Amino acid sequence: MAKARTVKGRTNTLGVALIGTKFMGRAHSIAWANAPKFFDLPLAVQMVWTAGRDASETHEFARKWGWHASTIDWQEAVQSEQVQLVDIATPNDLHCEMALAALEAGRHVTCEKPLAGSLDDARAMRTAARKAAKRGVKTFVWFNYRRAPAVAFAHQLVAQGRIGRIFHIRAAYLQDWGGASTPLVWRFQAAHAGSGAHGDLNAHIIDMARFITGEEVTQVVGSLEETFIKERAVIADAKARGRKTMGRSTVDDCVLFLARMSGGAVASFEATRLATGNKNKNSIEINGELGSIRFNFERMNELEFWDESRPPAQRGWTNILCTEGVHPYMSNYWPSGHLIGYEHGFVSHAADIARVLGGAKSEVALADFEDAWKTQRVLEAAIRSARLRRPIALSEID
Ligand code: NAI
Ligand code: SOE
């Protein structure tokens, strides 16, 4: 195992320890490596430790993705004196234990979404974050879609009053990878994931709706959850015995719900992994008195805008390519018209964390554990509403 190198001659460094080396481990590695290249940061990012489960895989990951040292004991990374920030990119059931250990050790924490697999874990994380905040320790949650320039621009348009009073929020996160041929990975096991499409995808669109409008969900009025694919192939058994063993999926394949917002708007949210033909259609439409906006991540560089203040003859949906230097984050990347992609949201996110920890301002608000807790309560309200078959006020959940 490689040893962490001490970075000499710099006092203003941000030593990062990443836990989790697969999908998000890769996205976060790109983010930490590229943030200092694209952004002028007040702290020098050091990719110190990465922790995974398999020693040789984790070592190879560290070598390939730019981490100084690797370990299969995440506590070793968290406790390292060279680490100021712990980055959690592991399945949802592990977020709480890892975050609590890191906060206890005085490390800042940035955790993947959803904040946790359960409300109890999320509450414990919020409580620990509140305690740690008194010692100047900060928390962050990777709600990366806030940093798609088109989404951040939508937030600006709303804040500038260009949409006016909001009537409708229509949010849907549609994917189709969860068919019957997809095996029983951790995402289909409640013990690891908490929920299925709900915590995975509704968490993003609840956060996005809250972020763009600045409104909070006050009540979930009706909700439906469904598990269409009840059994899936167990991977380990299939490999070991050369035949397919089936196991029960213990999470939803989809959850849909209606909600009321603090500003009076009505909202609908839909998350599914069975929307055949939709790959990563994270979409939201907002209708207001003065205009409307539409976003779809499958065309992430674009924002559609309807401006009701224009003369009637000139009204129509305008498709804005959000790649101008004046659009959020874009002056850090490429010239006008040169598109950015999925990873840039993570790069911008890492840059904003380094800015905040270095005493500067983030370009767009970062969700902390307190903020992500608000999204988690909405997830919980939707599930209770589906199971109890009644409206649930957010005030019922604490
Ligand atoms: P994954 O299954 O691809 O990777 C999970 C990683 O956690 C693996 O490297 C695994 O070895 C590691 N791990 C598991 N137990 C561990 C332990 N005890 N010690 C150290 N490492 C351990 O999962 P993925 O897709 O990367 O998801 C991780 C988290 O990121 C989840 O909370 C998920 O909801 C979130 N996520 C967020 C996305 C976003 O858009 N912000 C996109 C995809 C996932
Ligand atoms: C899988 O549904 C997944 O990777 C989610 O876990 C992410 O949060 C989402 O951004 C993309 O899809």
Image (spheres, grey):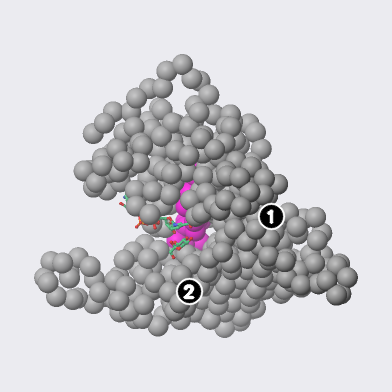
Magenta segment:
106-122
Considering every residue shown, the one lying at the far top of the view is 9
In this orientation, which residue lies closer to the viewer: 40 or 165?
A: 40
Classify mark 1: residues with Cα within 10 Å, few (<14), some (14-19) or many (20+).
many
Residue positioned 31% across, 41% down in the render = 64
Q: Position of residue 332 (x, y in %)?
A: 60, 41
Residue at the image position 26 percent from the left and 42 percent from the top: 60
User: Could you say which quadrant of the image residue 352 lies in?
Assistant: top right
> Where is mark 1, residue-wise?
153
Q: How many numbered callouts?
A: 2
Q: Amino acid at mark 1?
A: Phe
Q: Which mark is residue 278?
A: 2
Residue 127 appearing in the image: no
Please state the horizontal and vertical placement of residue 395, each as a whole percent of the image.
66, 66
**Tag 2 or tag 1, which sits nearer the N-term?**
1
Instruction: Check disc 2 and report its element: helix, strand or loop.
Output: loop
User: In the picture provided, is 147 more to the left or to the right than 104?
Assistant: right
* The quarter of the picture showing ligand 1: bottom left
Is 215 drawn above or below residue 272 in the view shown?
Answer: above
Q: Residue at x 51, y 54 (%)?
A: 341
Residue 194 in magenta? no
Q: Is residue 341 above or below residue 186?
A: above
Q: Are marks 1 and 2 in contact (CB under 8 Å)?
A: no
Q: Which class describes the residues within 10 Å of circle 2: few (<14), some (14-19), or many (20+)?
A: some
Q: Nearer the viewer, residue 179 or 133?
A: 179
